[in-house]
Image (cartoon, helix red, strand yellow):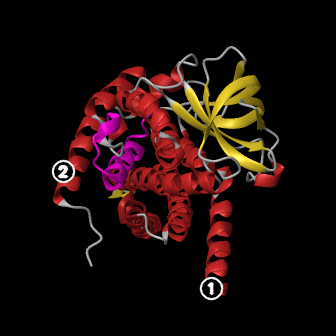
Amino acid sequence: MNFDFSDDQKSLKDQARKFLTDKAGAKVTRRILDDASLSYDEGLWRAVAELGWLGAAIPEEYGGLGLGRLELCVIAEELGRAVAPIPFSSTVYFFAEALLLAGNEAQKTALLPKVASGEAIGCFAIAEGPGAPKADALQTRFDNGVLNGAKIPVTDGDCATHAVVVAREGGGVSLVLVDLNQPSVTRTTLKTLDPTRGHAKLEFANVKGERLGRAGEGWPLAETVLDRAAVLIAFEQVGGSQACLEMATEYAKGRYAFSRPIGSFQAIKHKLADMYVAIEVARSNAYYGAWALSTEAAELPFAAAAARAAASDAFYMCAKENIQTHGGMGFTWDVDCHLFFRRAKLLAVQAGSPMVWKEKLVRRLEQRNAA
């Protein structure tokens, strides 16, 4: 059985890498870091939209390319490698997936073409503070078409035009589609370790919203959205991990100590070897997740959790060891190591920490084995 990408998908990967090498990279990311008034790079966002990446998995009848989620996985890996400072994951992995999963025809027709064109930026608001969100602990409410409550933190909530909010309705939980340009929506920008991916607190005071899907069925839908997004985020983490390994390897070959490249020392060799092994474990789990995602297989909940846990561990380890390989230079602002470390720490907690996903994997396996 061949789990590798097709020739066309590999061609897309090569083209994406060339484009992002030219249009993104450290210079673009640093520009967002240096300017506190910017939350993402608008030029890169427009360019990505023109390439059709935002609509890669959106059907053609809604303005997308209709390629599929395997192509989206390929793009996600390259975006992670480039540490791209754009709200791609919030808009595509979460918001668009929620619309495709639970939206009615009118909602899809109204918003998906705007997502594909880059006109709409989406976010997914589920957290209400520290800890993993739980259905019975949600305080945000949706009653009679009106939303009240607060969500914190919301990734890309500072720049999003629309949100899918997980809220209580009656005795259950529902997904609510909200236009964030309403005056009764209050945004408070949050400071995080990685300012190249904006975060905000969203407060809703009698905000009008539309339900996605049926009333009371929002929590299973939210879990499905999180599982789908987990696979795509895992590919971003794999891409970032690979970039860290290549960066560390290149430095180890060119940095001399005691008249020898530091890459010839056993301690550095072991670091690079450990990074390689962690990446390959994460990549294999991500590929399994990609298969489950693209085929809508029953194994998706298990594959998503495994991919998320392995990729989070790999990216953090590779980002940390990349700094260590660079030695004293690795801790400085001038070297790009910190860009990947920031993103590794941020992605590790987006949509749930590695511990949350490991617990999900164990719980889901126990439930399956008990059935």
Location of residue 85 with respect to 287 vertically, above or below: above
Return the x and y of residue 242 as percentages of the image width and height: 38, 55
Q: Give the range drawn in magenta.
A: 60-86
Q: Which residue type does callout 2 highlight?
A: Ser
- In the image, is 189 to the left or to the right of 103? right
Q: Which residue is drawn at 68% across and 73% down?
A: 363
Location of residue 268 with respect to 17 vertically, above or below: below
Q: Residue at x 71, y 28 (%)?
A: 202
Return the x and y of residue 229 as percentages of the image width and height: 51, 51
Q: Residue at x 76, y 41 (%)?
A: 128
Q: Residue at x 73, y 53 (%)?
A: 132
Q: Residue 11 carries which label?
A: 2
- In the image, is 124 to the left or to the right of 63? right
Q: Which of 327 and 223 is in front in this view?
A: 223
Marks 2 and 1, how far apart at CA: 40 Å
Q: Which of 345 and 106 is in front in this view?
A: 106
Q: If you read the primary sequence from the N terminus, does the residue marked by circle 2 or circle 1 appear first?
A: 2
Mark whose residue sits in front, 2 or 1: 1
Q: Which mark is residue 369?
A: 1
